Image: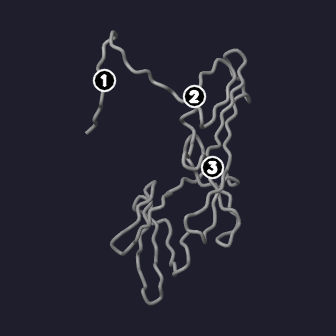
Amino acid sequence: MALGLFSLSSAQEISEAASVRGHFAYGDGIWRADDFGWFYYDLDEDLSGEMLQIDQDDRTAEKGHITYNSKVWTEQFEYQPWGSYERVAFFGKPYFAGYPESSFTEEVSSLEKGELREVLMDDDITQTLSLNRTLALQQGYVLVPKEISEKKGAVNFLLLKDGLPVNSSVVSIGESFV
């Protein structure tokens, strides 16, 4: 069921003005996250990095005169032993960009491979999995504990996408499933 809320007013009634974050362009222009609402901006961390620059000749922008770029930034994992990872924004959405070299992993860059990888979960919530409780991620992914060994302190994890298995691994206490 869809629900719509509308304000009924006639042409004679006074209505509130709408404000738009950004600026009008009557020629060349540069837009960043602080003045273009469709670019990624993390208010808590003051993180952004996307920029669109247009250099016009009259009302036309020739090939090579429209430039979009985004900067990579580093974030710390909540779980300290994992260290940090790199992210990049692309048209308003944050993506995984890679890992710097650490005790957790070798240096990995998905951008150098020409890949953008969506972040499937990014929150501070602690969750407990059991044989009866799975972890729903974004994009149709689900992490399922398939088997748990209390004697060996290990779990056999299965990663599903849209109900189909895509990866599995046995993880012992102190290890990570990547």
Q: Which residue sits furthest top? A: 12
Establish if 34 lies above or below 16: below
Q: Quadrant of the N terminus?
A: top left
Mark 1, secondary structure of its residue? loop
Residue receiving disc 2: 22
Neighbours of disc 1 within 10 Å: few (<14), some (14-19), many (20+): few
Mark 1 sits on what residue?
7
Q: Eyeballing the image, is 34 above or below 76?
A: above
Residue placed under numbered mark 3 in the picture: 88
Q: Tag 2's secondary structure? A: loop
Q: Secondary structure at mark 3?
A: strand
Looking at marks 1 and 2 on the same chain, the residue that comes earlier in the sequence is marked by 1
- Residue 100: x, y in percent? 69, 62
From mark 3 to mark 1, how far is it between C-alphas? 39 Å
Q: Which residue appears at 62% of the width and 44% of the height?
A: 48
Question: Residue 91, position in %: x, y?
Answer: 58, 40
Label 2 Cα neighbours within 10 Å, binned few <14 / some 14-19 / many ≥20: few
Q: Amino acid at mark 3?
A: Val
Q: Amino acid at mark 2?
A: Gly
Q: Mark 3 touching mark 1, by CB under 8 A?
A: no
Q: Earlier in the sequence, mark 3 or mark 2?
A: 2
Amino acid at the residue labelled 1 = Ser
Instruction: Please name the residue shown 59% across and 21% down the image.
Output: 24
How many other residues sit within 10 Å of disc 3, few (<14), some (14-19) or many (≥20)?
A: many
Left or right: residue 137 compared with residue 177: left
Where is residue 4? Give x, y as percent: 29, 32
Along the line of sight, the residue nearer the viewer: 154 or 123: 123
Which residue in the rendered view is the most extreme toward the left?
A: 1
Residue at 60% x, 51% y is 116
Identify the image quadrant of residue 141. bottom left
